[in-house]
Image: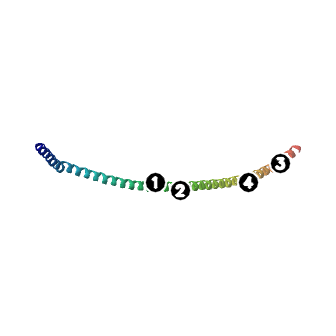
Amino acid sequence: MVNLDISAFLVTLTLSILLLILQKLYFKPINNILQKRERILRENNETFTRFLNEYNEKEKILNETLKKASIEVEKHKEKVRKEAIAEKEAVIEKAKSKAEELKRSAFKKLEEEIQEGKRTIEIDMDSLSEKLIINILNQRN
């Protein structure tokens, strides 16, 4: 039994030494690498989350600015459209006024020409009447 107890003691001692050697040479470096990797992943995750939050904030600000700019553009377009309509109506009104003035002027000129024509016809008629009377009188004599 002593032989078995010494064997069990030697096996336990050997395993303990092997475990210490493995702990020192294998498990500790692997644990250090795993801890370092976990720390890097955690830092990267924190950095990613921070950048994502910054991106979301900037995107929100950009969207708000874009919305405001779109509203301003629409307001400006409406203002320009109203100004264009007002200018168009002013041009049309001016053209109507000019056309009315030209029409009045043309009617006035036409009236003057009609009056002139009537006077010319009256003068010609008087002259022709006199000639006709003279011819008729000459023919009776």
Q: CA distance from mark 1 to mark 4?
A: 72 Å
Residue 49 spot, x, y in % from top left = 36, 53
Q: Report the amino acid beneath label 2.
A: His
Q: Residues within 10 Å of mark 3 (few under 14, many from 20)?
A: few
Image mark for residue 76: 2
Q: Are marks 2 and 3 in contact (CB under 8 Å)?
A: no
List the residue tagged with mark 1: 63
Q: Residues within 10 Å of mark 1 (few under 14, many from 20)?
A: few
Q: Nearer the viewer, residue 86 or 97?
A: 86
Q: Earlier in the sequence, mark 4 or mark 2?
A: 2
Q: Residues within 10 Å of mark 2 (few under 14, many from 20)?
A: few
Q: Earlier in the sequence, mark 1 or mark 3?
A: 1
Horizontally, is 31 left or right of 97 in the view?
left
Q: Report the amino acid beneath label 1.
A: Asn
Q: Quadrant of the image for the C terminus?
A: top right
List the residue tagged with mark 3: 129
Q: Report the amino acid beneath label 3.
A: Ser
Residue 19 spot, x, y in % from top left = 17, 48
Q: Nearer the viewer, residue 28 or 111?
A: 28
Residue 86 spot, x, y in % from top left = 60, 56
Mark 3 falls on what kind of element? helix
Q: CA distance from mark 2 to mark 1?
A: 20 Å
Q: Earlier in the sequence, mark 1 or mark 4?
A: 1
Q: CA distance from mark 1 to mark 3?
A: 96 Å
Q: Are marks 1 and 3 in contact (CB under 8 Å)?
A: no
Residue 66 spot, x, y in % from top left = 47, 54
